[in-house]
Amino acid sequence: MGVSLRKIIGLAGLFCLLTFAGLNTTFAAEKAGGEGEAFSPGDMITHHITDDYVWHFFDGHYGTLYLPVILYTDNGLEVFSSSNFYDEHHEKVAYGNYMIDHGHIKTLDGASVLDFSITKNVASMLVSIFLMLLVFLSIAKTYKKNPGEAPRGMQSFFEPIILFIKDEIAIPNIGEKKYKKFLPFLLTLFFFIWFNNLLGLMPGGANLTGNISVTFVLAFIVLIVTLASSGKAYWQHIFAMPGVPKPILLILIPIELIGILTKPFSLMVRLFANITAGHIIILSLLSLIFIFESVWIAPASVAFSIFMNFLELFVALLQAYIFTLLSAMYFGAAVEEAHH
Amino acid sequence: MELVTPGIGLIVWQAVAFIIVLLILRAFAWNPIMSALRTREGLIEDSLKAAENAKAEMEQVKLDNEYLLQEAKIERDKLLQEASVIANKIKEDAKKETSVITDKMIADAKSSIESEKKAALAEVKNLVAELSLEISEKLLREKLSDDKSQKALIDKFLKEVKVN
């Protein structure tokens, strides 16, 4: 136990150091590019938690991965590398009719354009999907290879989590009879959020689950699944809450109707806000060093951000759990049978 | 503001990718894993049940053995008791038979003694009768002179005879 704890602390320290190093180079780049411009923590943090057309790992010629830009315009599909937006000094320039303005691609002549680029977040999501498929398909293979045997290796790490989602989230909230239909979705949801939360904490990782588009899609799918599987009892609770006098229903029905939307909306905002806030706090703590322009503030900053990193590791799991649990509860309410 | 404005590109990519991953994992990971877990659960349950059954059977066998042992003990005690009763009876019977035999022997002896005695007495009587006849013969032959003395003599003889 002592050894493994030391290992974890060591890893976390290394982890923070790497984040720190990455940050440092970013500042250096900004300072060099900005010609003596003052360091702005707000800009730096925004840059780190929003999407980008390049994936920046470290400074230098090979430190940046230029991702493909895919645009759907009136002239059809256009695909080109995002390196076209940068000149040899890493300065943003216009390319053809397009330019990057405040992190989004705009046309110079004001024509509308739909942006389907493989951004940093999309690339990071593809990496996480690759990881998930790799992990769970190989686990499934192990199950098929050793039927009825005790789990081993990766299997024994993930099996309790899978069983937890089945026995503690799906069955109690949805019910013994109907949980099976929802279990694959809940498992995918949980591991997708967890994997991406953890990848987001990696140095150079994208803030995918802290992106409102991603949480919007997840919450929207939950809403669609809830409505698609809703039964008579679900709508009865909305339009004719049993045991409530008619006049009060006039107030209650609009509230319940709004409630259909606020539930997934809360899912969307909760995950987005928690993950983004965690990133902002860690970055802010490290920014202190540059705001005070003193190396003596570094130990405190790093100590706090190590603590925050641990907290974020916990939050990564907690938010995945909460999102899955609440989704299961909404599904449970949708498939509930009348028992009045 | 930029932070909370969803972008169409990421929404589309996320939706497409998530649904594809969901379908792939459902078909090739979650369903096989769930069925494997169910199979294993069944296997474990069966094994536990079998173990429980074996234990119960063992218990039964042990009980049976104990019962048999008890039974055997009771049987043995009964046999011992019966044997001792029989032995006692045999002893008793033997004793009784012996006493009957001895009684009979004693009785026999008594009766034989009695008959011997009777025979002896009869012989004595015969002898006395013969003697008295001889005596009376002698008296008749030699001393029939004096009636008085003859009569006295006869009385004397008769008295002697009566005693015997």
Image (spheres, coloured by chain):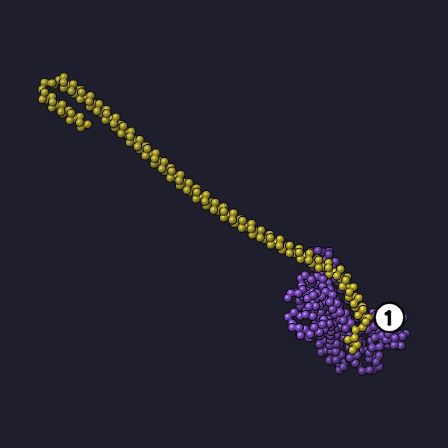
Chain colours: A purple, B yellow
Instruction: Name the quadrant containing residue A108.
Output: bottom right
Q: Which residue is at 84% across, 79% downward? A: A33
Please tell me which residue lies in front, A258 or B157. Answer: A258
The residue beneath circle 1 is A72
Residue A120 in the image, given as x and y percentages of width and height: 81, 71
Instruction: Name the quadrant containing residue A78.
Output: bottom right
Q: Locate the N terminus of chain A and report the quarter of the image it occupies.
A: bottom right
Residue A79 in the image, given as x and y percentages of width and height: 87, 69
Q: Which residue is at 73% across, 58% downward? A: B32
Task: Classify residue A108 as left or right of residue A46.
Answer: right
Q: Locate the C terminus of chain A and report the quarter of the image it occupies.
A: bottom right
Residue A285 in the image, given as x and y percentages of width and height: 73, 78
Chain ID of residue with mark 1: A
B42 relative to A319, above or below: above
Count residues near mark 1 (Cα–Cα under 10 Å), then give few for <14, some for 14-19, many for 20+.
some
Q: Which residue is at 74% across, 78% downward? A: A284
Q: Amino acid at mark 1?
A: Tyr
Element type where label 1 sits in the image:
strand
Q: Kindly tell me whether residue A129 is visible in this rendering.
A: no
Task: Classify residue A301 as left or right of residue A98.
Answer: left
Please tell me which residue lies in front, A10 or B93. Answer: B93
> Residue at the front extreme?
A246
Q: Which residue is at 82% across, 82% downward? A: A37
Residue A41 in the image, given as x and y percentages of width and height: 77, 80
